[in-house]
Amino acid sequence: MQRARTAPLVGAVLDIYLYEDTSFSLAREIRGTTGNRDIPIAFASGDHRIETRVAAIEAGGTRFFEKPISEEIFASLAQQLAMLSDTTSQKVLIVDDDPDIVEHYAFHLRGAGYTVDALGSAVGITEKLEEISPDVLLLDINLPGISGLDVCRALRMSESFEALPVLIVTGQTDDQTRLLAFRAGASDVVAKPVIPEELLARVGVQLERVGLLRDRADKDALSGLLTRRALVEAFQRSLAVATRDEKPLSLVLLDIDKFKRVNDTFGHLVGDQVIAQLGDLLLRRFRLEDLRGHWGGEEFILVFPGQNAGFAERAAALLLGEFSELPFASEDGEPFTATFTAGVAAYPEDGTSIPTLVRRADQRLYEGKQMGRNQVVGVVTVGISHPSDAEIQEGQT
């Protein structure tokens, strides 16, 4: 509590049972301190009863996690809380012809940290949406010249706006109006007069839902890493930053050795376990800003923004050492181990685009396969020697 009283928090993770009491009262106390009213709070407990979950929600919990919590889940939780607490870059577009109502909404939304823009009618709405790319659209049902329902229906016909959360605001609270709103594609319906706390809660729920759906769409189900599409998008952003700031960037393309033999000998389910274990290892290593993705099949890509080829080679060699020591077993219990071969490429020495960098890394990976596999090949060939943790940390600073 002392920390909460002295400075705003990004979020909080609370064990439900603290000594002889629960943390529900503590959560409420935290929310009562300056700057912490709307922070996300997660609860963790070995008590899985529905009553406990309901009590956690009542206390303002944003997430509920069952114990034990792994390092990977905790890291993911921390990222989610940071995302939920950071509304400074999230934008809301209000479309309403009443300037007083617009100002009322905007006052409370800005107070919660959102960026707010507004239109007095549906005229020019598509251009406005393309210009500012809002995260939420607050749309009045009665607009001059056209119904908000028709606007919502038209937006849902466009691929660009089909996933945009649209909150229809209406003074007509009958079931028929609500049904028409949802049939038009509304994400939610907000009744007038709008209660500020309810408005913020409904906007927050939509942002959280979209964020979680996007996160799921970006994650490969087998490895837990970024999908190829999501990886390319993130890679492009990192490359643009490296180009703008004239900083290095390095890439590792790795391929599990003799993976077809693993599948043929032990079965595809065991092969899936090898991929999943490598994905899990990748998730537990390196920095948050380092990109880790499943490129396809038995291939993975690592991207190290701000790091040169030398660092990438050492880091990949360390990873290879850890992966080669992981124990695997066939369905009959026969033990085996696996290795990978990796190729390293660096910006700008090896190329200035994703295709050229991946191609160069793939060439070096092929060289490693030709030299016997189980190694990392870069500007300077690195075998399976393992750099120390101190070396890796030094390379990250």
Image (spheres, grey):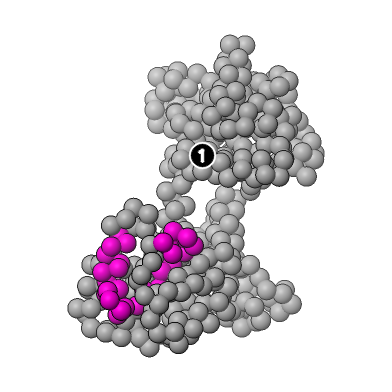
* Above or below 212: residue 333: above
- Magenta residue span: 127-156
Q: In this rendering, would 269 be left or right of 113?
A: left
At 45% from the left and 87% from the top, the residue drawn is: 100
Q: Residue 303: give x, y in percent of width and height.
A: 61, 37
Please name the amino acid that badge 1 sits on.
Val
Q: Nearer the viewer, residue 347 or 396?
A: 347
The residue tagged 1 is 232
- Residue at horizontal 54%, vertical 70%? 115
Q: Is residue 266 visible?
A: yes
Q: Is residue 141 magenta?
A: yes
Taking the image as drawn, is residue 53 in sight?
no
Kindly identify the residue that appears in the image at 40 percent across and 19 percent down. Answer: 264
Classify 224 as above or below 377: below
Q: In this orientation, which residue lies closer to the viewer: 144 or 336?
A: 144
Q: Nearer the viewer, residue 206 or 320?
A: 206
Which quarter of the image is occupied by the C terminus?
A: top right
Residue 146 position (above or below residue 284):
below
- Give the image location of residue 218, x and y in percent: 46, 47
Q: Position of residue 167 (x, y in %)?
A: 37, 72
- SS state under label 1: helix
Q: Count the marks.
A: 1
